[in-house]
Amino acid sequence: MKSRSHITFISILLTACVLNALAHAAPVRRKLAVKAGRIITIAGKDVKNGVILIKDGVIKAVGKEVEIPWDAFVIEAKDRVVMPGFVLAHTSSGLDRANENMPEVPFISTFDSIDPISTFFEDSLRDGVVTMLVLPGNNTLLGGTGTIVKPYGRTVEAMLIKRYTGLKISLRPSQNTSRMGHMQRFRRYMSDLKDYLEDYEQKKADAEEEKKPFDEEIDVTKQPMVDLLNKRLTAFVYCDRAADVSKAIEIKNTHKLDTVLVLGPDCYKAVGLIARSKLPVILDSQLVIWETNEQTNEEEMKVVPMIFHKAGVKFAFQIDTSQYGRRYLWYQAATAVKYGMKRQEALKSITLYPAQFIGVDDRLGSIEAGKEATLIFLTGDPLDAQSWVDQVMVAGEIVYERAKDERLKKLLEPPLIMQEPKDTD
Amino acid sequence: MRNCIILLTFLLFVLAFVAPGRAEIIAVKAGRILTISGEPVENGVILIEDGKIAEIGVGIEIPEGAAVIDAGKSVVMPGLVDASAAAPVRGDLNEQSNEITPTLRISDALDPQSKALKRIVQTGVTTLFVSPGRRNVIGGLGVVVKPTGKIPQQMILKDEAALRVVMDLDSTQGNRIPRYQVPTDFYYRRPGTRMAIIWMLRKSFFDAQQQKDSEQTEDPNLAVLSAVLKDEIPIHVNARRAIVIRAALKVADEYGLKLILQECTEGYKVAGQLAERKIPVVLGPFYYYPGSMGQYREGRKVNWNNAGILSKAGVKVALASGEQAGAIDILTAAIFAVRHGMDRDEALKAITITPAEILGVADRVGSLEKGKDADIVVLSGDPLNVTTRVEKVILNGKTVYKID
């Protein structure tokens, strides 16, 4: 009897040892303390020579006077600026094809189309964009649902933060249609949907009356639109021109939708309407626009973020992968600061605000106790072109180090310098 | 007595008109003056007389009656020089009737009211080089202009500044031969291959050489090419890929041509050779992934530090907007060149004095020195900061742009 209990005890001890060893083998260190030269918390004031305490990938404390526990692993970042990872609220990059040919496909999802080896994700990580909402492109009326991912992982499942977020509605008429036809198509879809739902409710009521079991489910091809009406999904409405803005607001009011406006470069003309609607806005990647003043015939520079900032509209930026400068979120924010936007507000526009727009601000977007430790370590000020992202931490795990970035080295240094043989003649 | 009065009135009139006509003196005070030619001057003054820089330095006495532009703590630098800008021309830049058109002058088509001109001046550019389009093997003569003046003649700083040659496949584009049809239209006569481009180039210079030796009546086309052969006019050669650059070097060797290479996206591969032969390059437009851009179908490989590698190898590098009206301005190009490894001072030179030297107008523009044109840019901070803004642009001593 006694020996038996001994065996049990020993086996429990052994199991505990094995489990302990496994826990240690995991790459995530349980307790971390980041000692940073400067912490841009976004939530409050910057902290100089502060400490961020992290436990299990979650921030426990931030500040100057944070006591570091004896068992925490300390990351020395005295000469680094640490801030929350940038958040991109809208992109259609990283997909093998961004638009479906059919106009009404709310049931498709970018989850099926995200290509983890796309260089877009690799570049994003290198540029400090650590969270992004990937939505279908701007050519489809009801384009499908989006996926929030981090640009790190070998499969979409590994990259995933949140599935089924946001539904893309584009008000730009697709090829061979007019704006009239485009809007009419949308209205007809909505009225058909309404009929379908009434019919469905009727059937349900009838079944209840007859005390029959009712197991008919809502048509899967319509489900996302139903979720949109129930506010389980947010509508990301793309407005190509200023004239589309009023349509977007009309749709929002008629169907009582949660809406985020995705604007084309020209939409700043509808700034008053947008400000009154109090809707969140995602700006086009082209921030400076030239226009000819018809009265004076002078060329005038329109600075889009300043126009919205002055009107009190909250916005997030987009990036564009081929243009110099415009492919960096920090560059977009710096451009806004250049023309007079407050620095703190500009930094919020690339971190906290986009996190709010895509509904992950409970986890991401600022450095606060309780939020995920998704941080970027910069060699200098985030708005300085000479700063580089040195390290990226996603949920307490270092996933990128510049010193180990082989492709960056190749982009900056030539793979080979070909020496021309001397002419023999 | 009456005559006296008339004379006096007359004299008064003359005085009234002559007095304001006297040389106007403008003094620009700034926290930091980047002269480019020398060390930066802290808390300096620039005196401008007759549109030229009369004096520059610290503690210069400002003459009585001078108009003072107090730039406060701002940074002042010479007006930028864009060695390959979008042409201020209405209409097409490509002459389709012939592929060898050396006598065409872009200066004949300049439009002082052009939108591109009004925009470019707000980015701090005060001197730009423009040339005919890219669809001809030999496109014509380019011109160095300033974005000022009401008629083209007032804009021109240097006419016939360079002859444009396009060795990239751009000059084969626009060849619209329909399938199964006999090419009868003039659109069909373009070169279709690089072999043909180089052959046409060789033939043109060969003819010019022949003509030089014989005493026949001069063909105006050949006259321009002869001037090129005599090194009187430099040639701007569009060459992106290393293979095209090498071909350009070969043709240049055969005819003893003085080259200036444009675009040169794969220049880093032949950096040593370009340095050895002292061939300057004008880089731009800039894209991160040229592969996806139509105009870059050739030269897909991208090297972010092209400018840095070339300048480190000893090549004269100018950063330009590359004829793209919507492209990034050259100040931003310099910022990113530094980010990717170019030396700071070299990058500032690459948008001021180096392009001025390449274009042969360094005696007039490109740096802040006594005697040069008073082309000045006032910046809100360090030029290589993204958050720095162009506050004021002074061109020939006149303020042509300022922010509200």
Image (spheres, helix red, strand yellow):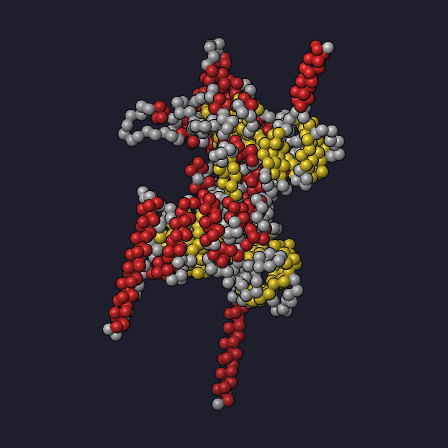
Picture coordinates of residue A23 (x, y %)?
52, 69
Q: Is residue B70 left or right of residue A330?
A: right
Front residue of B76/B303: it is B76
Q: Is residue B19 left or right of residue A420?
A: right
Q: Is residue A15 visible?
A: yes
Q: Is residue B234 visible?
A: no
Q: Where does residue A182 sit, x and y in percent of width and height?
A: 33, 47
Position of B41 relative to B226 (above/below): below
Residue A328 located left or right of residue B33 = left
Kindly identify the residue that appears in the image at 60 percent across and 65 percent down: A61
Q: Who's the residue at 36% across and 26% down the image?
A: B187
x and y, in percent, of residue A82 in the image = 59, 56
Q: In this rendered view, identify the residue nearer to me: A143 or B317.
A: A143
Query: Which quadrant, please, contains the C terminus of chain B?
Result: top right
In which quarter of the view is residue A147 placed? Answer: bottom left
A178 to B12, vertically: above or below? below
